Structure formats: structure tokens, C-alpha cells
Amino acid sequence: MIATMYKRRMKAAFALSSIVMLIGISVFFIDRPDSLQNWLNLSSIGIVGLFLFFTGVSNQIKYNKVKDIQIHESKASLLELDHLVLKKDLGFFPRLLLFEKSGHFVGTIKPIRIPFIFYPMSLLLRDSLIMALPITYGVFSNKGNVLFTFKRKGMKKSIVTVKNVHGRKLGEYVQEDWKSLVNIKGELSDADDKLILPVNVKAFSGDFTLTDSEGRQWARFYNGYFPHEYTNIFRDVYNDIVELSDNLSKHHKMLLIAMIGFLFLQRNQ
């Protein structure tokens, strides 16, 4: 799955680079630049094309380094893990690939039941704005089975409702979107609207340490930290790993993963 991810990135970057370069060549022959400003405009198109090309080369190198490494699907349940590696995947809408730090694939978080009208918006909006759309996201096992779902609604605040596969509400994550530029604050509640976890995330780095009222740590993330011994598998400069408590109930683990998934889907990269 990791090799496939790099291969998709490589193909997408090369395809976009070709399109941008063709646009630049077409502009050159149709309306040749006759001033410094026009040359600068044309050069900017070329720079974008070259950037995309070298992005493709970078991902090709990463793909070649991991394509022969045998990495099997995880035998562990997503809800049993004490950590998650989250990787943004390509798509019209934000989606996440979930791994163990050993590289074993454990599942995905991706949209389901997308209204057709939202597809044109996906070409114009950044991930943080796309996540404001009322789209249902599913958390899938590595076998492709839906484990639970979540969906955002609200204007001034994000109200993310988490449901099980039968459509029964498990709880909600409510996030204050506009009150602070320094910290992202929210609350995770159960199906009876009882607060079970306050959430405080540093807006710029995304760092968080989530602790409940009894002092138990539920999750921790430090942006930029990743065990060095696993960088031979995960070749990106930045790899996101979240530590999870293994002393949570299945119900609370679902709510926690849904909340973390929402936070990482919102991030612009």
C-alpha cells in the first residue's frame, strides 16, 4: 500500500506537469510574449511545471526504494492499536491511509455518499474548506469494511457526529472554528452529550496531548516526530504518528479515532 501511494503521487505529478507544460507551450506559440511582464507570466507557468515534474521524480525515487519491500496487511484491529501513522492520499476529496509504524496497512478514512455537486468544489477549495462540506466519511478496515462513520455540520463551529455501522449515534466532537488562531479547542462527548474529553490543539503545529478529567492520557501527537528506525519505509520528510491509549473502551476508541481523523483531514499540506 505504501508503494502504491508513492506510485499514485508520481503519476499524478507527472500528468499535471505535462498539462502545465503544454499550456505554457501553447501560450508561447499562440500569443508570444512581447514584454518583460509577459515573459515573467510565461516563466511562472514553466516554474510550476518544473516543480510538479521534480515532485514526480521525488516520489518515483521513494517508490523505487520501497516497491520491493514486502509489507503485509496488519493482522491487528484498528481499534486495538496504541498508535497510528496517518498519510494523506490523493483524491478529489481529502482521505487518509492508516498504517502501523512497521508499515502494515490497517485501514482508510475516506468519503462516502458524495453529492455530485460537490465535485467541482473539490477543484477550488483547500482541504480545510472542503471539510466544511456536509460529507459523510467512513473509517474502513484494511479489508474494506466500514467500522464507523462521521459527518460534519454547522457554520460557526464544527459539529462532527459519529455513528456506528447501523447508524446509531456514538457521540459528537464539537470544535470552535473561529474563536482562536493560536489553539483549536473542542469537546468530545458521548451519545448522551456527556463530556468525555476536552480537546486543545496548537493551531500552527497541530501538536496535542489529550487528557481527560481523571488525568488519563488518550492521545498524543508531536508534529515532526517519527521513530527514525522506520524511515526506511516511510520516505517522506514529514510522517505523522499519533500515540493512542490502549486502555480505552471500543466505543471511546471509535470516537477518538473519528476526532483525530477529522483533525488530520482538515490540515492543508
Image: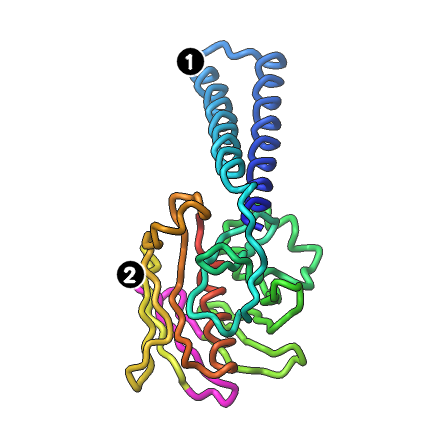
Magenta segment:
174-194
Residue placed at 47% from the left, 83% from the top?
A: 249
**Residue 184 falls within the magenta-colored stretch:** yes
Asked whether, in this view, residue 126 is left or right of residue 197, the answer is: right
Amino acid residing under circle 2: Val
The answer to which of marks 2 and 1 sits earlier in the sequence is: 1
Asked whether, in this view, residue 260 is left or right of residue 204, the answer is: right
Asked whether, in this view, residue 199 is left or right of residue 160, the answer is: left
* Snapshot quadrant of residue 108: bottom right
Residue placed at 57% from the left, 66% from the top?
A: 75
In the structure shown, which secondary structural element does the residue marked by tag 2 occupy? loop
Q: Which mark is residue 182?
A: 2
Q: Residues within 10 Å of mark 2 (few under 14, many from 20)?
A: few
Residue 94 place in picture, x, y as percent: 55, 54
Residue placed at 53% from the left, 38% from the top?
A: 63
Q: Reply above or below: 34 against 189.
A: above
Can residue 166 be seen?
A: yes
Q: Nearer the viewer, residue 133 or 53?
A: 53
Q: Which residue is mark 1?
A: 36
Q: Nearer the viewer, residue 134 or 257?
A: 257
**Residue 218 falls within the magenta-colored stretch:** no
Amino acid residing under circle 1: Leu
Residue placed at 51% from the left, 70% from the top?
A: 154
Asked whether, in this view, residue 264 is left or right of residue 9, the answer is: left
Residue 268 place in picture, x, y as percent: 44, 51
Q: Residues within 10 Å of mark 1 (few under 14, many from 20)?
A: few
